[in-house]
Image (cartoon, rainbow, N blue to C red):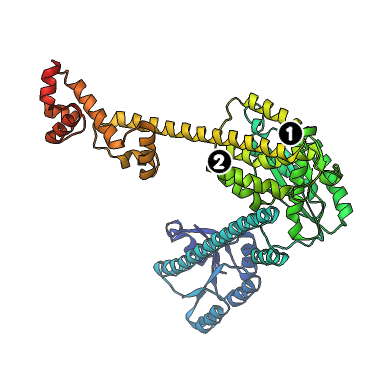
């Protein structure tokens, strides 16, 4: 429904226009009337009409001047001029000034309706164009937000090769950071997995709330970015114009404030790891790894603390195992390739300890956790559970506490990998077993229908070839053989009903062709169904 303002110095004309036409029927709401151009300008500002129907000759401000002033003020209403025959040239000037159209006096109602209809069509077109532009703008914003998040993730993971590459990407997505010193800290929600059933906070809601608390503090330090890589962990980057020492002290201070506020407001705790400051974008990944490294001290000293890597034991080594070194090991574990995993483990340990001849026991523990942490994440992703987890934990932690050498560390890591791969294989086996159980249940309920292996695979959302192999591995026979055997077993059960003929039994077990049924039956029992029935009477 578009809003229309009627402007004419003669009241009877205004009333005629307003009341002799059913404006609602043509999608128009009459928003008001004005007796001259001056009053019309005020009403245009107040009522924001879409269409203004105005006489061209009026006292004070005439229609021509009215159209000019509207245009100057940036009013987007469509102006339709009502003109007498003598005013025709005058009306054309109004069109040049931006009036949408004109109509000559005297006019019939239908003429006016037609002019208004053309006007509303144009308004519809402009509205549609505006909506399309708005949608396109929103899509661009969403795309840019996704690209920005991808950029930040790549930045902290160290995937960029040079500063120039980083600057080029930033220019491409339209972002700029004006700071001269940068720092990363990671806020980890303690016991995030237990939030929900036993707490008032849902995991994602808790993450969102903590994020808001962090933002209240970091916004005071300069430009900042908050984002997530893992549930329960908030990564914060700060781009500051302050010196590195001042920035480091500020982050340490706000970290303690963040923990205190989260504990007070949300009744949960967070642990914070802080990396070192840096002055290049390329080194932000190092600051991130240091922040993650600092968080690992939670294992030794507890949660609800702030761990600043700069203030930790100066003799403690930071291994900073690059993702491209660790990834082949994780890939081998993911596909349960034990031999490849152990080979890749040697490469990882060699790379991590190449400059270390005198590792302390605490260094060995830290390296163990750095290598095994992403392995445990694989288990969690697969929803697997380590059997006898208590004895597993006790045994491995006993060995971890007495580590004295790299060789002992390697042996412990090899045993850990073996347990994890066994766990994953059992998990895969259990998943396969459950899938086949569902398949057998479906076959049991539909054996009397013309089902195929593809039908069952489709019901289970599996690739037919993969399902075929899985079925044989789990049952010991092909899908076709299993279905035939089941149907013949069911046929024998039906034979106990003397009222059923052989062709009826065949149909009941999914065979419309009795001769084919007989052939299959003989392949299992060596005799035709009729002979078999006689034998079991």
Q: Position of residue 335 (x, y in %)?
A: 52, 43
Figure check: 19 above or below 535: below
Q: What is the distance, in whole Å, between disc 2 and disc 1 at their CAs?
A: 44 Å
Q: What element does badge 2 sit on?
A: helix
Q: Quadrant of residue 205?
A: top right
Figure check: 534 above or below 510: above
Q: Quadrant of residue 9?
A: bottom right
Q: Earlier in the sequence, mark 2 or mark 1?
A: 1
Residues 336 and 503: in front is 336
Question: Which disc is residue 114 wearing?
Answer: none
Question: Which disc is residue 266 wearing?
Answer: 1
Q: What element does badge 1 sit on?
A: helix
Q: Classify mark 2: residues with Cα within 10 Å, few (<14), some (14-19) or many (20+).
A: some
Q: Position of residue 467 (x, y in %)?
A: 38, 40
Residues 455 and 118: in front is 455
Q: Classify mark 1: residues with Cα within 10 Å, few (<14), some (14-19) or many (20+).
A: some
Instruction: State the quadrant of the C terminus.
Output: top left
Left or right: residue 356 versus residue 478 is right
Please, which residue is most extreme toward the front here?
Answer: 407
**Which residue is found at the position 48% from the left and 63% from the top?**
124
Q: Quadrant of residue 166?
A: bottom right
Left or right: residue 117 versus residue 530 is right
Left or right: residue 478 versus residue 491 is right
**Which residue is found at the position 66% from the left and 70% from the top?**
73
Figure check: 332 above or below 507: below
Judge whether residue 499 can be spotted in this image. no
Total count of labels? 2
Q: Position of residue 270 (x, y in %)?
A: 75, 37
Judge whether residue 149 can be spotted in this image. yes
Q: Position of residue 233 (x, y in %)?
A: 69, 42
The residue that label 2 is drawn on is 338
**Which residue is found at the position 16% from the left and 21% from the top?**
495
């Amino acid at each position: 429904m578009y809003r229309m303002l009627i402007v004419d110095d003669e009241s009877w004309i205004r009333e005629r226009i307003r009341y002799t036409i059913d404006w609602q029927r043509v999608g128009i709401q009459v928003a008001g009337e004005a007796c001259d151009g001056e009053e019309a300008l005020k009403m245009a500002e107040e009522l924001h009409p879409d269409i203004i129907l105005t006489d061209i000759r009026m006292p004070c401000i005439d229609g021509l001047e009215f159209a000019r002033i509207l245009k100057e003020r940036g009013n987007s209403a469509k102006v339709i001029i009502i003109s007498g025959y003598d005013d025709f040239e005058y009306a054309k000037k109004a069109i040049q000034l931006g009036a949408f159209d004109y109509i000559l006096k005297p006019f019939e109602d239908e003429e006016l309706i037609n002019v208004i209809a053309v006007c509303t069509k144009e308004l519809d077109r402009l509205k549609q164009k505006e909506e399309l532009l708005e949608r396109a703008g929103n899509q661009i914003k969403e795309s840019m937000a996704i690209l920005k998040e991808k950029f930040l993730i790549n930045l902290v993971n160290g995937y960029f090769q040079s500063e120039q590459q980083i600057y080029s990407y930033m220019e491409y997505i339209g972002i700029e950071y004006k700071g001269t010193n940068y720092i990363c800290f990671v806020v980890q929600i303690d016991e995030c997995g237990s939030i929900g059933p036993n707490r008032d906070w849902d995991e994602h809601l808790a993450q969102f709330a903590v994020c808001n608390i962090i933002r209240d503090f970091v916004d005071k330090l300069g430009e900042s970015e908050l984002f997530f890589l893992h549930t329960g962990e908030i990564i914060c980057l700060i781009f500051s114009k302050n010196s590195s020492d001042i920035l480091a002290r500020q982050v340490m201070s706000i970290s303690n404030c963040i923990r205190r506020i989260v504990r007070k407001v949300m009744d949960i705790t967070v642990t914070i790891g802080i990396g070192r400051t840096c002055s290049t974008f390329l080194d932000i990944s190092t600051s991130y790894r240091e922040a993650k490294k600092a968080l690992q001290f939670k294992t030794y000293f507890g949660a609800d603390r702030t761990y600043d890597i700069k203030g930790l034991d100066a003799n403690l080594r930071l291994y900073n195992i690059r993702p491209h070194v660790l990834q082949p090991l994780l890939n081998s574990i993911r596909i349960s390739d034990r031999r490849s995993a152990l080979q890749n483990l040697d490469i990882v340990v060699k790379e991590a300890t190449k400059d270390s001849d005198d590792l302390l026991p605490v260094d060995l523990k830290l390296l163990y956790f750095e290598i095994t942490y992403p392995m445990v994440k694989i288990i969690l992703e697969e929803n697997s559970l380590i059997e006898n987890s208590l004895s597993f934990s006790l045994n491995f932690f006993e060995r971890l506490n007495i580590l004295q050498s790299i060789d002992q560390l390697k042996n412990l890591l090899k045993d850990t990998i073996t347990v994890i791969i066994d766990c994953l294989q059992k998990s895969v086996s259990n998943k396969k077993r459950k899938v086949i159980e569902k398949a057998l249940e479906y076959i049991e309920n539909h054996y009397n229908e013309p089902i195929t292996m593809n039908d069952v695979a489709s019901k289970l959302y599996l690739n037919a070839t993969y399902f075929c192999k899985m079925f044989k591995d789990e049952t010991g026979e092909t899908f076709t053989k299993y279905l035939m055997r089941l149907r013949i077993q069911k046929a024998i059960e039906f034979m106990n009903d003397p009222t059923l003929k052989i062709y009826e039994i065949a149909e009941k077990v999914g065979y419309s062709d009795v001769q084919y049924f007989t052939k299959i039956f003989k392949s299992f029992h060596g005799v035709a169904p009729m002979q078999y029935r006689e034998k079991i009477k």
